[in-house]
Image (tube, helix red, strand yellow):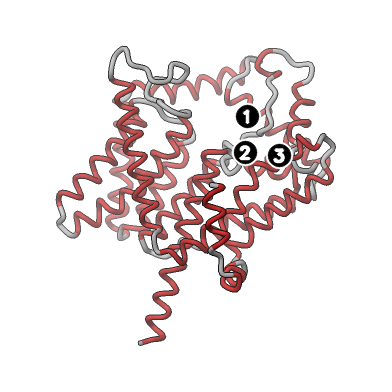
Amino acid sequence: MFLWLCTALLAIEPARFAANLRRPAALLPLLFVALALVGTLWTDDSWPVRLLGLSPVIKLAVIPLLIDRFERSGRGHWTLIAFVASCSLLMGLSWFDYLVSGLHIAPDKAPGVPVRNYIDQSQEFGLAVFALAPFVLIFIQQRRIAPAIACGTLLVGFLANMALVVVARTAFIFIPVLVVAFAFRFFSPRVRNIALVAALVVATLAVVGSPYLRYRVERTIHDYRLNESTDIATSYGERLFYWRSSIKSIEEAPLFGHGTGSTKQIFEREAAGKSGEWANLVRNPHNQTLYVAVQWGLLGVILLWLMWYYHLTLFLERTLVSWMGFIVVVQNIVSSLLNSHLFDFHEGWLYVLGVGVAGGTVLAKRRLDSSGESGG
C-alpha cells in the first residue's frame, strides 16, 4: 500500500484532486481522519495509546486517492475480477482443508479456515456471492450458458461453504439485507416477491439440511438463555456488557468524547476487579457507532453516518459497478451493528478499497456519459 501511495501521489493532478475533494464522498473520510488526529489532544492516556487508537482510522484517507486514481485509470473492473478470483482460490483451499482427512493447513484455526479467521472469510465470501449474482442473471438473459454456469457454480460454492464449513454469525444479518436489496435492484415487483419467497425457502432448507448451520443457530439461542440465567460470559453477554460500558462512558463526554484511543483505558477500568472472561481486556465495544461515540462523541457519530450516507448515495444508479460499491457499503453498515468493521483491519480495508475503486469507476462513467450527451 505504501508503494501504491507513492505512485498515486506522484500522479495526482492538483486541480482535479481539489475538485474531487468538493464531493462529500471524498471529503468526509479526510474529515474523519482529521477529527481522529485532533482527538489525540484530549485523550487522558499515553501517546503510544493515542497513536494506537489513530491507526484504524488512517486508512480512510486512502479513499479519496483511490477515487481520484480509478476515475482516471478506467481499470476498476480488473480489481473486481481479481477479488472474485482470489476469493474463488480461497474457497477451493477452504474446501480442500475441510474435506481432506489428515490435512489441516492452520492447526490453530477451525477446519476450512486456511488463513486469517472465519469472520474475514465470511465477509469476503458474502461479497463474492452478491458480486456474482447479477452476472448470472445477465448471462442467462443473453443466453450465454457457459458463463452463466461458471458464475452460478462459484456462487453456489461460496454459499455451500458458508452453510456447511464455516460462517460468522454476522452473515446471518447482512445476507438477508443484501438479498432484499438485490431483489429490489434487479427484479420487477412480481418477480421480486417470487424471488424473496424462494430465497426464504432455500434458507430454511439450508438450516434444516446443514448440521453446522443448525449448530450455529442453536448456539446463539443457547448463549442468549445462558446469559439470562447465569453470570457466565457468553458472546452475547459480553457484547451487552461492552455496549453498556460504552453508553456509560458516552454520558460522561457526549459531545466530543474521551479522545482518540480512549477505549483502552475505559474498558480496562470496567474489567478491573472482575474474574474469568469478564476480566478480558478489550479496546473494541463491538459496535461501530459506539466505538466512534466513546472517542469523539456526537461529532464523530455525525461524521461516521454522513460518510456512510454519501457513500451509499454514490452507488444508487442501476449499473453493475454501482451495485458492487453498494454491497460493500451496506455490508459494512449492517455488520458494524455487531462489530466495529470499519476500524477492523481486514473488513476496514475491504471497505476502503471497495468504495474507492467502485466510486472512482462510477464517477468516470458519469463523466463519459455527460461528455457524450454534451457532444451530441
Res. 214 in view: yes
Name the secondary structure under disc 1.
Answer: helix
Residue 120 screen position, x and y as percent: 47, 34
Residue 161 screen position, x and y as percent: 33, 31
Picture quarter containing residue 290? Answer: top right
Residue 307 screen position, x and y as percent: 60, 56
Mark before the other along the chain sequence, 2 or 3: 3
Q: Does 69 sit above or below residue 60?
A: below
Disc 2 designates what residue? 287
- Cα distance in 3D space between marks 2 and 3: 15 Å
Residue at figure coordinates x 44%, y 28% from the top left: 115
In this picture, residue 166 sits left or right of residue 231: left
Label 3 CA crowd tier, 10 Å (few <14, some 14–19, many 20+): many
Residue at figure coordinates x 43%, y 35% from the top left: 122
Q: Which mark is residue 239?
A: 1
Residue 151 screen position, x and y as percent: 25, 46
In this picture, residue 345 sits left or right of residue 372: right
**Three-letter code, disc 2:** Asn
Disc 3 designates what residue? 53
- Cα distance in 3D space between marks 2 and 1: 9 Å
Is mark 1 in CB contact (under 8 Å) with mark 3? no
Is mark 2 in CB contact (under 8 Å) with mark 1? yes
Residue at figure coordinates x 75%, y 22% from the top left: 271
User: 20 or 272, which is in the foreground?
Assistant: 20
Name the secondary structure under disc 2.
Answer: loop
Front of the two marks 1 and 3: 3
Name the secondary structure under disc 3.
Answer: helix
Res. 213 in view: no
Mark before the other along the chain sequence, 2 or 1: 1
Residue at figure coordinates x 37%, y 52% from the top left: 182
User: 358 or 105, which is in the foreground?
Assistant: 105
